[in-house]
Amino acid sequence: MDNLSTLLTQLISSHKLAFSFLLIILLLIFRWALIRVIRQRNILDSESPRRWVNSITNLTTLLIAAGLVVTWLPEIRLFALSITAFAVAIVLATREFIQCLVGSLYLASSRAFSIGDWVCINDNYGEVVTSDWLSTTLLEIDMISNKYEYTGKTLIIPNNLFVSGTVHNLNFIRRYVLHTFSITMEPEKTDFSSLKLKLLNNAKEYCKDFQEVAGRYGNLIEKRLGIQLNNSEPSIKIGTTDLGKNILTISIFCPTHEATNIEQKLTEDFMRIYYERAE
């Protein structure tokens, strides 16, 4: 008996396709025969044949499916493992692509910036030129040295950085900026009070043409952001460095394109006043 079972199992394993066709044909013939008998014996009862036919049809379909699954189980298991491995490989290969799509959806939902805005993304400063499903293009702006000028470089930022990094919208400083710079000098006996006063008067003179507009723009930023800026008037602070040198920190709220020009004027004024006193 065991030998017969083993032989039958080997025969089925070596002829799976033929056995599958034979199983389907036999079960279909069996179903057809039973349905034929039931319909002939229950002609007068209209409900009973339908129930039996439906049950037999479902049962034979289940037997066919079960027989095929048992017959082809090793191949099905191998196919499932192959599909799983393929799916995992696809996900790993397109991980960056999927993350970029998620980043684009995040940008669309959060409205972090628009085309033309100035932004900072992972210490990369620039103006947004285009933004699609995969990347965002920036025209680089020199913000590190406070020049607020285009460098001529184009930055292609993958959108997955918006999910893992921080996005700073700098659009408010596109027109006006609180520009701060420092002047360092050797520690000497100098009347910094009068020097500070003269530089402050010069700063106000340079900013007087746009002072009113700068004040309104500052108020607009305060209302939009809900903060108090208090930066419409130029200011100068005197301090020292860790090495004991004197330092003047000058802050002006001015048009962005005028920031570097005003900084140069005030630096030249300081040099002139300082060296005139030294002489």
Image (cartoon, rainbow, N blue to C red):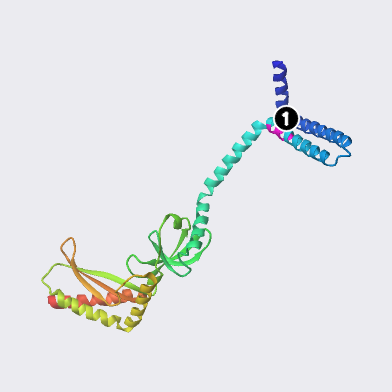
**At numbered mark 1, what does the secondary structure look like: helix, strand or loop?**
helix
Q: Nearer the viewer, residue 111 or 170?
A: 111
Q: Is residue 67 magenta?
A: yes
Q: Nearer the viewer, residue 25 or 119?
A: 25
Give the left or right position of residue 161, taking residue 94 as reference. Answer: left
**Mark 1 = which residue?**
16
Residue 51 visible at all: yes
- Compared to residue 225, the image places residue 82 above or below, namely above
Q: Who's the residue at 43% across and 54% down the image?
A: 164
Q: What residue occupies the far bottom of the structure in this picture?
A: 209
Residue 275 visible at all: no
Q: Residue 25 placed where, x, y %?
A: 80, 33
Crowd class of label 1 (few under 14; some 14 to 19; many from 20; radius 10 Å): some
Give the left or right position of residue 50, taking residue 221 as reference. Answer: right
Q: Who's the residue at 35% across and 76% down the image?
A: 219
Q: Residue 13 placed where, x, y %?
A: 70, 26
Quadrant of image for the C terminus: bottom left
- Compared to residue 225, the image places residue 50 above or below, namely above
Q: Residue 169 placed where, x, y %?
A: 41, 66
Q: Nearer the viewer, residue 192 or 63?
A: 63
- Compared to residue 116, the image places residue 98 above or below, namely above
Q: What residue occupies the far left of the structure in this picture?
A: 189
Q: Residue 197 placed where, x, y %?
A: 19, 78
Three-letter code, disc 1: Lys
Q: Main secondary structure of the magenta part?
A: helix
Total marks in image: 1
Give the left or right position of residue 10, taking residue 235 as reference. Answer: right
Q: What residue occupies the far front of the structure in this picture?
A: 45
Quadrant of image for the N terminus: top right
Q: Who's the residue at 89% across and 35% down the image?
A: 40
Give the left or right position of residue 6, taking residue 231 as reference. Answer: right
Residue bounds of the magenta highlight = 64-69
